[in-house]
Amino acid sequence: MAFVLDASACASWAFADEDHPAATKALLLASSEAMHVPLLWWFEIRNILVVNERRKRLTEAETHRFLRRMDRLTILVDDSPVEAVVIQLARLHRLTVYDSSYLELALRLHLPLASLDKQLVAAATLEGVRLIG
């Protein structure tokens, strides 16, 4: 079953000390299923990695290895959000536009969402989006 992957769930895969049941389930699914992400995801993941290099949680080599592992997965980048829906969801659920882009994608594609963001998970639940984990 394909699903929408948000940056919070994906980023946890980069850190040995961050274990979460939803992220673990998403990672297991990722080995055999396609993941859909908004274009924003590409920037978010790389920013998280670089910021954590600065914090000495990751080395450049670890970042490189993580990104190469991500390259082996089927990650489908969506670059055509429905603007009105993204903004409506952000207003309705008091989400950032960034987070509402993941919710809009899950709603538009009728796919479950993998996220560790509590506010996004709550909004997805209210919108009837299935959750991974």
Image: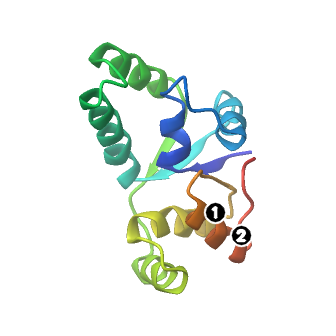
User: Is 109 left or right of 55, judged from the image as shown?
Assistant: right
Indicate left or right for 65 with 31 as reference: left
Task: Please give the name of the residue rendered at 58% of the width and 43% of the height, measured from the top-left corner.
Answer: 35
Residue at screen point 75% across, 47% down: 133
Position of residue 14 measured from the top left corner of the image (x, y, whole percent): 48, 28
Could you tell me residue 21's position as x and y percent?
72, 39
Residue to which mark 1 is pinned: 121
Which quadrant holds residue 105? bottom right
The residue singled out by tag 2 in the image is: 125
Residue type, mark 2 in image: Thr
How busy is the neighbourhood of tag 2: few (under 14 within 10 Å), some, or many (20 plus)? few
Q: Nearer the viewer, residue 80 or 64?
A: 64
Front residue (pair 86, 21): 21
Instruction: Determine whether label 1 and label 2 are within 8 Å by CB.
Output: yes
Type of residue at label 1?
Answer: Val
Q: CA distance from mark 1 to mark 2?
A: 6 Å
Disc 1 crowd rating (10 Å Cα; few below 14, some 14-19, many 20+) is some
From this view, report whether residue 107 is shown above or below residue 115. Answer: below
> Is 61 drawn above or below residue 98 in the view shown?
above
